[in-house]
Amino acid sequence: MIKDNSDPSVGKKIKKRVYEKELARLQIELIKLQAWVKQNGEKVVVIFEGRDAAGKGGAIKRITERLNPRVCRVVALPAPTEREKTQWYFQRYVDHLPAAGEIVLLDRSWYNRAGVERVMGFCTEEEYIEFMRSCPEFERMLVRSGIRVIKYWFSVSDIEQEKRFQDRLDDITKYWKLSPMDIESRNRWVDYSKAKDIMFAHTDIKQVPWYVVDADNKKKARLNCISHLLSQFDYHGLVIKKIKELPEREIGQSYIRPPISDQNFVPDNYS
């Protein structure tokens, strides 16, 4: 077991009432940000990377749950197909980049090559070296084209990760979160740590730096991540026009509804 060098203050619990109040406030700010992005034709990509069970999915869920999926969408690509393996490596990600007025959240990204593919041997040495050489240039190109790229690394200690893996093992509703790949990554903690360090050395660039989220405390990690994300945009001058009241509904005098008996209803099992 690796020694736990995490900050002990990170593990302190935040009161549920305080967490929910602050999350609600931040989600209102996210709605304002969404409106600003749409109104100004901004193009935003947010990358979420980190160890398995680090809490990336939970943070993404809290970001998106109040937003319009037509403006803010999540992209979580499966393993590449045989055809995709023959393409330029970044090609399948390019298809999912945002148009004007869109936010794309990447639940894992092209950094798979620097992490899981490198550690598990799913890419060649030449492919890995080429990725490290071309990734910074690819991201600089995105920035020059007008796309805002923000990268988060969710950092979790081995002790906390082990607790979360055990929780998944004991909870049937979380079985799907524990894959054979997760088990293998558990056994290769040091290899993943080395791969992450090398990745940061090559890709933590001025135009698109990495931001590390200390994620041993899930609730704090979510609040800190959302707060930081909001701080990256100057959206505060936006005025959202509210609809003060609904107009009176038009009543169609000539419309006759068909008999209810002609429709198939879902059984009411909870009367």
Image: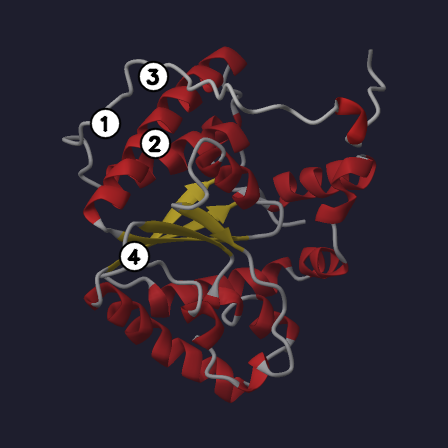
Q: Is residue 209 above or below residue 223?
A: below
What amino acid type is highlighted by mark number 3?
Answer: Pro
Q: Which of the two discs, 2 and 3, sits closer to the camera?
A: 3
Disc 4, SS: loop
Instruction: Sort mark 2 into few (<14), some (14-19) or many (20+) by Cα contacts within 10 Å.
Output: some
The answer to whether 146 appears left or right of 221 in the picture is: left
Q: How far apart are marks 4 and 1 (CA)?
A: 31 Å
- In the image: residue 163, left or right of residue 29: right
N-term-proximal mark, 1 vs 2: 2
Tag 1: amino acid: Ile
Of tags 1 and 2, the one toward the viewer is 1
What amino acid is found at the position of numbered circle 4 in the picture? Pro
Q: Mark 4 points at which residue?
A: 209
Who comes first in sequence, dot 2 or dot 3?
2
Note whether 111 is above or below 58 in the view shown: below
SS of the residue under disc 2 = helix
Disc 3 crowd rating (10 Å Cα; few below 14, some 14-19, many 20+) is few
Q: Distance between the residues labelled 1 and 3?
A: 20 Å
Which of the two discs, 4 and 1, sits closer to the camera?
Answer: 1
- The residue that label 2 is drawn on is 31
In the image shown, does 267 or 155 lie closer to the viewer?
A: 267
Question: Would you call the spot at circle 4 few (<14 residues within 10 Å), some (14-19), or many (20 or more)?
Answer: some
Instruction: Give, as a three-letter code, the residue at label 2.
Output: Ile
Question: Going from the N terminus, do you reach mark 4 or mark 2 first?
Answer: 2
Nearest to the observer: residue 14 or residue 148: 148
User: Mark 4 or mark 1, which has the lower sequence index?
Assistant: 4
Identified at 25% across, 69% down, the residue is 140
Q: Is mark 1 on a helix, strand or loop?
A: loop
Instruction: Name the mark on residue 240.
Output: 1
Q: Which mark is residue 247?
A: 3
- Image coordinates of residue 39 in percent, x first then y, are 22, 42
Determine whether 74 is above or below 91 in the image: above
